[in-house]
Image: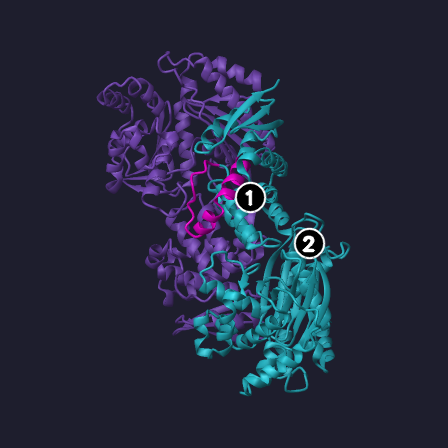
Chain colours: A purple, B cyan
Amino acid sequence: MAKITAIIDIGSNSVRMTVFKRTSRFGFYLLKEIKSKVRISEGAYCNNGNLQPVAVDRAICALREFLNVAKAYKATKILCVATSAVRDAPNRSDFILRAKREIGLNIKVIDGAKEAHYGAVAALNLLYVKDAITVDIGGGSTELALIRNGKIEELCSLNLGTVRLKELFFDNSLPMEQAKNFIRNELGKIPSCFKSATIIGIGGTNRAIADAIMEIERYNVESIHGYEIDLAIKREFFDRLIECKTHKLKNFKIKPERYDVIREGALIVTSIVDLVGASKIIASGSGVREGVFLSDLLRNQNTKFPQNFNPSVKSLLDRFCDNEEEILYIRKIAIDLFDVLSPIHTLDKEFARYVSIASKLVNIGTKLSFYNHRHHGFLFVLNSLEYGFSHYDRLLIAMIVKYHGRRFGGFDDDKFLVFCKHNEVIIKWLSIIITIAETINSDMSSPKVSFSYKEGVLYIQTYSDLYICKEKLKNILKEVALRVEFIRVD
Amino acid sequence: MAKITAIIDIGSNSVRMTVFKRTSRFGFYLLKEIKSKVRISEGAYCNNGNLQPVAVDRAICALREFLNVAKAYKATKILCVATSAVRDAPNRSDFILRAKREIGLNIKVIDGAKEAHYGAVAALNLLYVKDAITVDIGGGSTELALIRNGKIEELCSLNLGTVRLKELFFDNSLPMEQAKNFIRNELGKIPSCFKSATIIGIGGTNRAIADAIMEIERYNVESIHGYEIDLAIKREFFDRLIECKTHKLKNFKIKPERYDVIREGALIVTSIVDLVGASKIIASGSGVREGVFLSDLLRNQNTKFPQNFNPSVKSLLDRFCDNEEEILYIRKIAIDLFDVLSPIHTLDKEFARYVSIASKLVNIGTKLSFYNHRHHGFLFVLNSLEYGFSHYDRLLIAMIVKYHGRRFGGFDDDKFLVFCKHNEVIIKWLSIIITIAETINSDMSSPKVSFSYKEGVLYIQTYSDLYICKEKLKNILKEVALRVEFIRVD
């Protein structure tokens, strides 16, 4: 597997390239994203799907420069897929040959089912749900995949896209009812098994809507990936958006570059929501390009990461952790402590998972600066623990990183105070547990210890002085209803 | 030079170790700091300076664990210096031999002049002033160095320290006047050439006071290093602190672990301020340990970094930048643009320095996450561009990083809005200049270009399409009084 891989996706609206960097066998992160609003489908829908010369010229220009970028990153693998507009074009081979001849790019045209499959691969591996329908709305087509119990069960592709709707109906000022009829007709092709409470929203339209709602709500986690839209509350936002005049889109916090096709997109979303009976949309920052990348990365793995492997945790550690031995020790001790202290923290066993992940990440902030490293670690986790975690998970782990390692004296967050108050007991105890584990390892010698707990006292059996540990712990455990006693064994 | 170096400093109050990691020949950052409040001087001042057995035991315990930490980091060089309490102790050789025998540590006792020298080396190389007096207040002694025109001119060491004052006067409840007499007597040893408007405050006392004032002022740059205390305004804070009862120190935002010696420290500071005629204290996060480290690192360099070299910029790039060619190009283009556009931005030539540094750092945030990378870059710069820059410099560069690369539509900072408004023209133009430079390199091919400017129009002479550049620039330069025209040369 190449260390740097560039994936290009020639959509009907935009051409995009994502550059991924592998940091270890399965650890990776997104290095660069670049797009050009080529709109290769321009004029095609009124010309029997044929790509128009001006649009093809634009695509070649943009792709040539994309390849320069890939070269600058020393990408050793470049995979390029083309979707709806190109696959529907009777004259597609002219374009493909020209790309090959003029810029040396191999374009692979994928059918709708494959496109739906890639979206589902991304969602399954990079989000955190096992039952959902992925909905990837593009300029020319919309792809759906039914995921049940962690498996991709059905795929479906519709000739329904934002640019297509715009050019066929909105640009010609045809009545909304005609557009709705067209949509209804296309939706009829969706198999009846496509029913789910959860939609995973992929593609530019879904991202733009999530982004807008997040801004209106002044939502504080600055990440679209994993943002959940509760339709019981937000459905009317979609309806008002569809009917909105262009000059008022600003009030909906839609970005200007999306003005031209956002209403078409919202109309497609709501139509599908109604059909499949969804009550929630989870926005996905990942889509076809991630799906192509993962299908290549995990080609000998049945397109799945190894069990208990998380690519974000791994790549954060690869990038920012210099001392693996330390984190293995802290994690082991912290998990022991979580068990031993269960009578006092009374948290459900499932929270051991957070102890395990947070204890790996507690010190990644030191790569930026030792001072305030807990706060940096908090930001690192919040911004970069992206794949496989809900926003709740990310925030909780980020808070544990932030509040560990010092006396717990309440929260100093302005932005996330409500979240912290709601989860006070969890954040407090999990950070205290990790703090004790880390403090036991103050001299970083991974000392042998064992624990027992009785009536408010944690007994730590030790085989060495733990001099600095004792000095620190005295201070840290003030104001906590837990005493520590050391039993020295020689 | 070792890649990981640990420096231990056995002070009268605390024993501390700092672990530095070199990222390239002269690039380095602080990996770890650990301290134990051993107070090796305890009981010594009332016993003719002799180190007491209990205190020595504590020191050996702490140092043993420090060495474990150094080992865990695979430090290949460990340098240990001991200052006032040990050098004054008639029985110091017992301690030194014991450390050698029991834990294999070589302790080098340094005299007061050497100690003052190390503080000055740190200040000269890691702060940004060429004329100042460094004042390093310790538990047993206080060291001063006179720096003039970037050179260390005079050194001076006084038997005046916080623990010493505490044990000799405060613990015995002797009248304040006796302590002041003692101080006056010691200050008499300072050569009369020690006059300066600027004091650089080194050591725990100075850090604790800066920290307290920053908290009271709700100061937003979370970094003591480089924080400036204007004595015209803050002098009375010191005076009130000296007279304050212990139970009220909390109101002064002094941390509990400093309660015991903070008044003694403040008394020493103000006495020296008055004597040398200082109007400003610049807090230094660096001191003797950094001085020892730098003296070793720069031993063939006359204890100076190469000209125009900055260790923070270099180590940020070493840690977080993967594409050196890109930043060299952007920097060159940005500096050209700064010159060509001088009729429109009208900024002084000195600001070219910020263009040069900011353009190197614009993309370091992508190492954390491509999305929001400008905001991450902002935080990276603010927290880690520590050495050699004032807080003003850091904030300005951080803001340029934050606001570059997109349409400039005003500031969205809550915390730093006042700063931004004050520096609006600078931030706006320098970020626009870097944005244009970066956008020209959209395809990362470092395209050949040249510039001219006339009446509100920037003419860019190009030899290639710059297709993506043109697409982006159109959007970015909206709302700026600058048009761009491309002249294609074949």
Question: Which region of the structure is painted magenta?
Answer: B406-435
Who comes first in sequence, dot 1 or dot 2?
Answer: 2
Q: State the CA–CA distance, disc 1 to disc 2.
A: 23 Å
Circle 2 residues within 10 Å: few <14, some 14–19, many ≥20:
some
Instruction: Say which element carries label 2.
Output: loop
Callout 1 and callout 2 share a chain: yes
Q: Which residue is mark 1?
A: B364
Residue B193 in picture, x, y percent from top left: 70, 69
Identity of the residue drawn at 43% across and 36% down:
A286
Q: Chain of mark 1?
A: B
Residue A473 in picture, x, y percent from top left: 49, 70
Q: Which residue is mark 2?
A: B3
Magenta segment main secondary structure: helix
- Closer to us: A379 or B287: B287
Location of residue B340 by image quarter: top right
Residue A332 in picture, x, y percent from top left: 50, 59
- A380 shown above or below A423: above
What amino acid is at disc 1? Ile
